[in-house]
Image (cartoon, grey):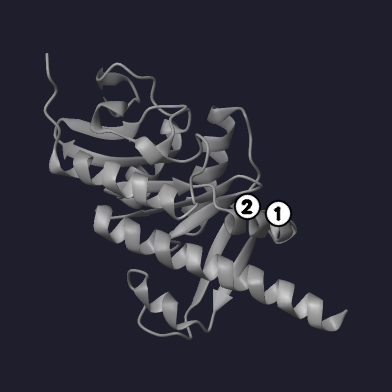
Amino acid sequence: MNRKFSEKETLLVELGRGFYARGWVLGTSGNFSAVVSHDPFCMAITSTGLDKGSLTPDQLVRVDANGTVTEGSGQPSAETALHLLAVRVCQAGAVLHTHSVWSTIISDLHAGQAGIWIEGYEMLKGLQGVSSHTHREWLPIIENDLDMSRLAGAVETTLNQHPDVHGFLLRRHGLYTWGEDLAQAKRHLEILEFLLEVIGRTRHASATSAS
């Protein structure tokens, strides 16, 4: 039987290909999701182990609130629990996870501080609820963990402690961000990736000039 794909799923695939083209999800890295319906709850998410540069709608699976596959033949991302957590705790309608070079570097350099403050940049105004470049954005950094249950617990604790954040970094892994819909999640991803690259390049330039 041919599956029928929602507009959200079609857009999710297009965004995934675009993120690959920008170098944010090379190899089989990254995963993306979007809530298709709330009652009954249904979330579309990329299957595990895929090349995002050639992503197609039939490589998405639909899961329920417990992460159980209800439609599709693939295996959902191993990090499905983190997507469901962002949906539940942050009321997200879409969750995007990338493995860019700069997010990976910054997540390691600032891991000792459990996060990084970002302030003074005009681009911050693109984050939901932010109206001034003087805003201070806290981007938590969480230690990566192969035990997904334990990792989800650490993420949930962090999100409850910092309810106003727009994303978080997993150390030496990458960025998670979200939005009330795919358009907002895409905007948050572009802004945070931009800022992480600026911070990384600025730090490198400062070190080079000082040497």
Structural distance between the alpha carbons of marks 1 and 2:
7 Å
Expressed as whole percent of the image width and height from the top left, the position of residue 6 reads 13, 37
Disc 1 vs disc 2: Cβ atoms closer than 8 Å?
yes
Location of residue 180 with respect to 61 vertically, above or below: below
In which image quadrant can residue 53 be found? Answer: top left
Q: Which amino acid does label 2 sit on?
A: Thr
Expressed as whole percent of the image width and height from the top left, the position of residue 44 reads 27, 34
**Residue at left offset 56%, top offset 73%:** 118
**Residue at left offset 48%, top offset 86%:** 134
**Residue at left offset 43%, top offset 67%:** 191
Q: In this view, does 103 lie to the left or right of 176?
A: right
Viewer can see residue 192:
yes
**Residue at left offset 17%, top offset 38%:** 38
In which image quadrant can residue 210 be found? Answer: bottom right
Kindly identify which residue carries mark 1.
108
Q: In this view, does 140 lie to the left or right of 45?
A: right
Q: Which mark is residue 62?
A: none
Disc 1 secondary structure class: helix
Q: Which mark is residue 104?
A: 2
Disc 2 secondary structure class: helix
Q: Nearer the viewer, residue 67 or 160?
A: 67
Q: Which mark lies nearer to you, 1 or 2? A: 2
